[in-house]
Structures are given as structure tokens and as C-alpha cells.
Image (cartoon, rainbow, N blue to C red):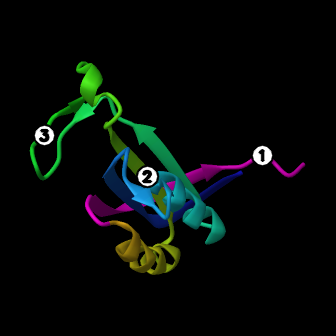
Amino acid sequence: MKIEVEARLVTIYLNGTDQWHGRPLYSAIVQLCQNKEIAGATVTRCVEGYGAHHRLHTTRLLELSENLPVRIEIVDIPERIDPLLTELDAMIGEGLVTVTPTHVIKYLPDPH
């Protein structure tokens, strides 16, 4: 079975060492999404990148390899994303958030 819906893709770019109440911020965000029953959230550790301060973070330099960029992608309908964004305001001290309209095609097993 195939379901199609208009949704929003939220992409959050953070530093992998960012913390929220003593735990990794990316983990706290995924837990928040799970608690809010958001359709999906995925964390990807990046190999190399830089942000607002233009400091390179890379796996190529041993002393910087602990401090890598992290990308979190979150997908759901706008009615669920909008309240989530309000909660994220209190959690993200430094980072970048993009919100993009997207078309979701979800494939489910046939109920037969």
C-alpha cells in the first residue's frame, strides 16, 4: 500500500559535542521527536564541515575529530512540525535549522 502526503522536512545542523541537560543535544532532540510521536528523525554524523565561525571540523585532523558536525533530519506533517519547532527554540543555543516543504511517499505492507 502506498500513502502520499504533503509534509515538512526539518534539517538541523549542530556540533556533535553540543549538550542538553548533560546529554548529547542530537540525542535529546531525537528523544523529543519520539515522545511527540513525530513520524521520523535521523541523525547523521558528518565527515567534514564548518558553520558560522568558519572553523573546519574534520575527521582528517585527529585533534578535531571529536568535534564533528551532526545533521538531524525530521519529517512529519506541518501540524506536528510547527509545535516541535517552538520546543526546539529552547534547546538549540547555536546551530542552523532549515524547514522545507516536501512530498512524502510511504510504502506499507499489503494488509492481506
Q: Local crowd at mark 3 within 10 Å, few (<14), some, or many (≥20)?
A: few
The residue at the point 9 percent across, 44 percent down is 54
- Residue 94 in picture, x, y percent from top left: 26, 61
* Residue where numbered disc 1 is placed: 109
The residue at the point 21 percent across, 36 percent down is 49
* Callout 3 secondary element: loop
Q: Which residues are magenta?
A: 93-112
* Residue where numbered disc 3 is placed: 55
Q: Local crowd at mark 2 within 10 Å, few (<14), some, or many (≥20)?
A: some
Q: Amino acid at mark 1?
A: Pro
Viewed as shown, does residue 44 lie left or right of 101? right
How far, Cα to Cα, is label 1 from label 3? 46 Å
Q: Specify the label residue 68 is tagged with.
A: none
Q: Amino acid at mark 2?
A: Glu
Q: Amino acid at mark 3?
A: Arg
* Residue where numbered disc 2 is placed: 73
Give the answer, above or below, for where 3 lies relative to 61. Answer: below
